């Protein structure tokens, strides 16, 4: 209780000296009792506060604020200058500070990651026993770098233990999540066993607060992440209970239904989901208790197409349906590509059959001419036509093979060399001129314009662009190839006076299988729909680009290609980015 010497009974009972000493003794005893009472009141207040906090802490800032109040209470009750919490990090097997501490700076806490085998912290954590030390510098258990860093004189370290109890308050399990330190007893006093027992009780409450708060925070953050993922996915999701109440409806589903984004949870399906295929699908699934997979088209004939799948959620303890989950996957693009592929196969079959029919016809005619009905000039004309049709077949098959390489991810291997672009463009113009009498095909290009490129693939690019210019100018006119030297690159424009491209097609013309065939003037043109797709990839393979520079319906189009003078350097830069 007190170190005050009690009154000496040998002195006379009414001796003034004895009375003064006795009075002083009882004054000290009363003061000691008052101190103990204040300590117990503080302890009770702290325990009550911590019990209340467990249901309040819901975020990391709130946990930090709660711990800040907690360490101040601990410091006040134990009369310590410093309080520090260390939490076990299983992934690194370290004891790391859990802020905030008291009397410890942020710079100091950064240096306090302690191994579970090191110092008093590690010993207390491993053995689940408390440790008291009143000579930190000479105690063999302490880490001297920590003692020096925090200027520790003495201290107590207790384990942070999570205790699980059953309904009858019997201990069924316990787990250590870290340790609590208090350092430097105030007024240069030593810590005692009573301080240690009191700190153990406070540490048990602190461990419960930390564990419950961290678990709650973890679950809350996971829930928020799931909610964010649910809100951001592009697949529409609708969940309706067996009573027809909407539990979930994400933004993708709201967009699909063309309803404003809102909070739909708790509202009746009849109010939220408009009458139609989606409403009927959900209702029929609930009524029949059978899962379904169907395709639904929203809007008019050109509306979006969704693959809708319903799944039943049943109670764990019975087969009773609790709700239906419906997932809507937008397959509009898939169906569009399928239609394009079907049209492509039909078109390619036609494109292959046409030259083959012509070749077969002329060869049969020549073979049947046993009597020499055709003179040498006519025969030569037949052979020229056969040769041209073979070239046409070769170009088509080459295009198909290159598209196959692109689609399979194999890319296009380039055989780069120094190419005289002036000569190449003039040759392309000259090669296409014999195929048409309605057009005048010219090449305007500086003399000796050299470029590093794959000559064969560059020829394919120009063949496709010039071929398209001729094809989409059924009334004839000029087709001009213009090359411009731009120092580190070359620009090539292919200009025609043809039909032009309707605005609705301009963003899609470089997509595979795309054809401008829904316009009256374009329907009879034909083609495979892979020419511009291939041009784009061949240009990109050179580190270049292709684009539609201009196009007015009825006034022609201009396609432009830009190719680097040094494709190896450009491609290397692109790979490194």
Image (tube, grey):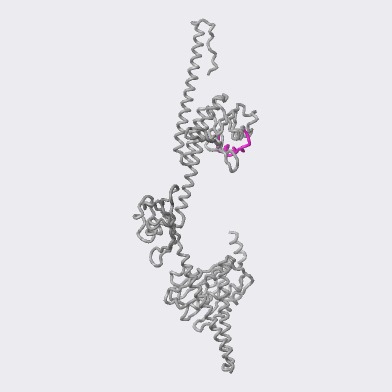
- The image quadrant that residue 257 belongs to is bottom left
Residue range in magenta is 103-119
Q: Nearer the viewer, residue 33 or 314?
A: 314
Q: Nearest the camera: 173 or 555? A: 173
Farthest front residue? 318
Quarter the C terminus occupies? bottom right
Residue 440 lies in magenta, yes or no? no
Q: Position of residue 106 (x, y in %)?
A: 55, 38
Q: Work out whether 128 lies above or below 358.
A: above
**Does 535 appear above or below 189?**
below
* Residue 103 in the figure: left or right of residue 520: right
Image coordinates of residue 201 in percent, x first then y, are 52, 30
Q: Residue lying at the far left in this picture: please name it.
A: 271
* Total residue callouts: 0
Q: Is residue 369 above or below residue 494?
A: below
Residue nearest the observer in this picture, 240 or 114: 240
Residue at figure coordinates x 54%, y 15% from the top left:
4
Q: Left or right of 136: which side holds 296?
A: left
Q: Position of residue 41 (x, y in %)?
A: 46, 26
| Residue 101 in view here | yes
- Judge whether residue 263 can be spotted in this image: no
């Amino acid at each position: 209780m007190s170190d005050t010497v009690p009154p000496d009974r040998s002195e006379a009972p009414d001796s003034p000296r004895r009375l003064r000493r006795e009075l002083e003794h009882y004054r000290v005893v009363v003061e000691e009792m008052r101190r103990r009472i204040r300590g117990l009141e503080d302890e009770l207040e702290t325990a009550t506060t911590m019990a209340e906090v467990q249901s309040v802490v819901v975020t990391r800032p709130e946990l930090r604020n709660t711990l800040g109040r907690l360490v101040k209470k601990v410091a006040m009750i134990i009369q310590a200058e410093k309080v520090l919490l260390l939490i076990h990090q299983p992934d690194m097997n370290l004891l790391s500070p859990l802020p905030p501490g008291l009397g410890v700076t942020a710079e100091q806490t950064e240096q306090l990651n302690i191994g579970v085998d090191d110092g008093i912290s590690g010993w207390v954590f491993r053995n689940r026993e408390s440790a008291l030390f009143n000579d930190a510098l000479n105690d063999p258990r302490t880490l001297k770098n920590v003692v020096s860093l925090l200027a520790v004189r003495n201290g107590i370290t207790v384990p942070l233990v999570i205790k699980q109890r059953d309904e009858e308050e019997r201990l069924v399990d316990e787990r250590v999540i870290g340790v609590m330190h208090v350092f430097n007893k105030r007024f240069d006093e030593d810590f005692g066993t009573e301080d240690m027992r009191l700190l153990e009780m406070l540490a048990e409450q602190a461990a419960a607060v930390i564990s419950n708060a961290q678990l709650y925070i973890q679950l809350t953050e996971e829930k928020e992440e799931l909610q964010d993922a649910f809100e951001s996915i592009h697949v529409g999701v609708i969940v309706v209970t067996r009573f027809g109440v909407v539990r979930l409806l994400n933004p993708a589903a709201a967009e699909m239904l063309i309803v404003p984004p809102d909070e739909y949870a708790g509202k009746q399906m009849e109010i939220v989901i408009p009458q139609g295929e989606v409403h009927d699908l959900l209702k029929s699934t609930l009524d029949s208790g059978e899962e379904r997979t169907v395709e639904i088209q929203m809007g008019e004939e050109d509306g979006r197409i969704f693959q809708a799948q319903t799944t039943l959620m049943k109670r764990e303890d019975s087969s009773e349906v609790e709700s239906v989950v419906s997932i809507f996957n937008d397959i509009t693009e898939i169906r569009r590509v399928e239609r394009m592929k079907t049209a492509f196969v039909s078109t390619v079959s036609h494109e292959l059959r046409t030259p083959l029919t012509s070749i077969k016809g002329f060869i049969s005619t020549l073979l049947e001419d046993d009597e020499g009905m055709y003179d040498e000039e006519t025969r030569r004309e037949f052979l020229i036509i056969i040769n041209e049709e073979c070239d046409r077949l070769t170009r088509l098959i080459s295009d198909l093979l290159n598209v196959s390489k692109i689609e399979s991810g194999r890319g296009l291997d380039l055989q780069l060399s120094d190419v005289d672009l002036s000569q190449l463009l003039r040759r392309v113009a000259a090669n296409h001129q014999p195929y048409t009498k309605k057009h005048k095909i010219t090449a305007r290009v500086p003399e000796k314009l050299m470029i590093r490129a794959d000559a064969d693939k560059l020829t394919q690019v120009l063949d496709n662009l010039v071929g398209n210019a001729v094809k989409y100018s059924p009334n004839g006119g000029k087709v001009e190839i213009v090359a411009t030297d731009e120092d580190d690159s070359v620009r090539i424009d292919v200009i025609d006076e043809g039909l032009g491209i309707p605005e609705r097609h301009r963003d899609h013309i470089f997509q595979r299988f795309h054809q401008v065939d829904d316009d009256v003037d374009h329907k009879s043109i034909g083609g495979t729909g892979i020419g511009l797709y291939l041009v784009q990839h061949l240009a990109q393979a050179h580190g270049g680009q292709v684009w539609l520079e201009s196009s007015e319906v009825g006034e022609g189009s201009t396609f432009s290609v830009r190719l680097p003078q040094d494709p190896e350097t450009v491609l290397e830069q692109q790979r490194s980015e």
